Amino acid sequence: MNTIIRYIASLYFWLELNLISAILFPISFLVYLLTFPFDKQLRILHKYTCLWSFIVLKINPMWRIRVTGRNQINPAETFVMVSNHQSGADIIVLFLLWTHFKWVAKRSLFNYPFIGWNMRLNRYISLDRASTGSMKKMMVDAARTLKEGNSVMIFPEGTRSKDGNIQPFKTGAFHLALENKRPILPVAIRGTSQAIRKGGFLINRNFNIRAAVLAPIAYDDFRESEPREIAEMVRQRIKEAMEKD
């Protein structure tokens, strides 16, 4: 019976996600058309996308989500934001930070109906991890995005964790912070790996999902460090936060 309930709950979640996205995307396109002439950073559209995720999660009764540390985010600052990556649910949850940023996300996501199309409208940054040329272009696009006054959100593990344990961090995000003299804003996520297993269809119910914004790391605090050292330092901070109750 538990397996049957899980299948029903999972079917509900994926249908709900796609139905809500199909309903909200036309509004997203309208928001883009109405605001683009005066909102070049697409802040209003991104805020609407945060609302989109809020609606999807609000009518999903299977997860309990708590976001802490929003007061650590200075809306006047431009950050390189980094988070551990446990599952596909991370992206939906991180929109609940309700702050402006541009995602760095794998290219295939931009082709998904409605959700991917909305990512294109928002001018989020695509990346093909298998392509060296794509990696270089991502760094150029991310640097330009920072210079335009947008924070950039990156998963430095590069891919989702299979077991929820934090993986080694790649150095791209930290090269970006060094080269553009931007502070780093770490975010720790816990619980999403159990809510949706990597590569799985089934949704697990009654999971507590936590996203904690940690204290920003000023550029002056790492300006003399190598990207690998910064990556390990930030990884340890996120790991410690994940282990807290």
Image (cartoon, grey):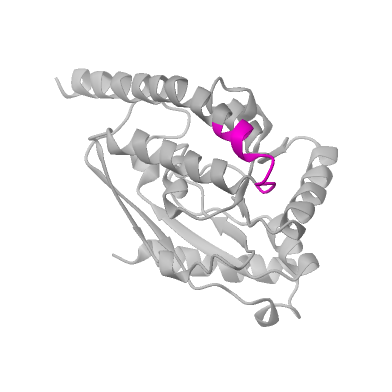
Left or right of residue 160: residue 212: left
Q: Residue at x 78, y 47 (%)?
A: 141
Of the pair 113 and 74, the residue shown nearer to us: 74
Question: Residue 126 location in percent, x, y?
Answer: 70, 37
Relative height, residue 196 to residue 95 (above, below): above
Residue closer to the observer: 229 or 44: 44
Instruction: Determine whether, in the image, residue 189 is placed left or right of residue 64.
Output: right
Residue 36 within the magenta-colored segment of the rendering: yes
139 or 24, nearer to the observer: 24
Residue 109 location, quadrant: top right
In the rendered image, residue 96, in percent from the top left (x then y), is placed at 41, 49
User: Which residue appears at 78% of the width and 55% of the height?
Assistant: 143
Residue drawn where x is 53% and y is 42% of the image: 160
Q: Percent from the top left, x then y, of residue 119?
A: 60, 34
Query: In the picture provided, is 209 more to the left or to the right than 119?
Result: left
Name the residue at 56% across, 28% down. Answer: 30
Instruction: Classify residue 235 by image quadrant.
Output: bottom right
Give the extent of the magenta segment.
31-41
The mark total stands at 0
Q: Quadrant of the N terminus?
A: top left
Q: Is residue 111 magenta?
A: no
State the image coordinates of residue 125 (x, y, percent, origin top left): 69, 41
